[in-house]
Amino acid sequence: MATPHSSPLAVDDLGNALLCLVLAAEDKPPRDAPLPLALVALWHGDHVLMVFDRFRQAWELPGGQITPGETPRQTAVRELQEETNHTPERMLRFVGFARFTLAPDQRAEYGALFTGRTVDVSRFFQPNAEIAAIRWWDLRQSLPGRLQPLDVYLAKLTRNTPSMAW
């Protein structure tokens, strides 16, 4: 299990911070803070799927709030489908629990991080009330608008995970 670094791994312009990635079993989340969300890094070759969130006005990983009675994995699959109309070819791989502190009150919480691959990038995307656009991003090129640095760091962590060889 990872422990928080003395300095954050990434901080955004609002003061939200990614502290660490806790490597634990998917069914054994940390108990020291709530686990309200799940995120997905979906890869096609060396490009990760990013969404532009209308409310936060930033590019970020697909994901969202875990609803009552839903597992983090179910949330990840549902949010990926709702936000991008994409599904992975194989089951998503659980990576770990990302520990955040959220501004302004420095409230701690976790997000379950999943990763997967797709070969089909031709799926039809329809902008909606939450997501204005999607892009396949290579982690280097510029994107129009602001990038969420916490999500960029998490995407980089998943880029060369062992399951990515399939």
Image: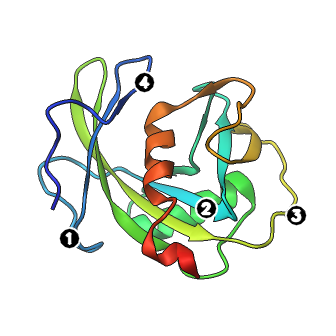
| Numbered mark located on residue 122 in the image | 3
Q: Sequence-wise, which precedes: disc 3 or disc 4?
A: 4
Q: Is residue 155 above or below residue 163?
A: above
**Looking at numbered disc 2 in the image, what kind of residue is underneath it?**
Leu
Q: Position of residue 11 (x, y in %)?
A: 37, 26
Q: Residues within 10 Å of mark 1 (few under 14, many from 20)?
A: few
Q: Are marks 3 and 2 in contact (CB under 8 Å)?
A: no
| Numbered mark located on residue 12 in the image | 4
Q: Quick one: SS at disc 1? A: loop
Q: Is residue 101 above or below residue 114?
A: above
What's the distance in space between the residues labelled 1 and 3, CA to CA?
Answer: 36 Å
In depth, the one of 97 and 160 nearer the eye is 160
Q: Position of residue 65 (x, y in %)?
A: 45, 50
Q: Is residue 20 above or below residue 107?
A: below
What's the distance in space between the residues labelled 2 and 1, CA to CA?
Answer: 23 Å
| Numbered mark located on residue 28 in the image | 1
In depth, the one of 121 and 160 nearer the eye is 160
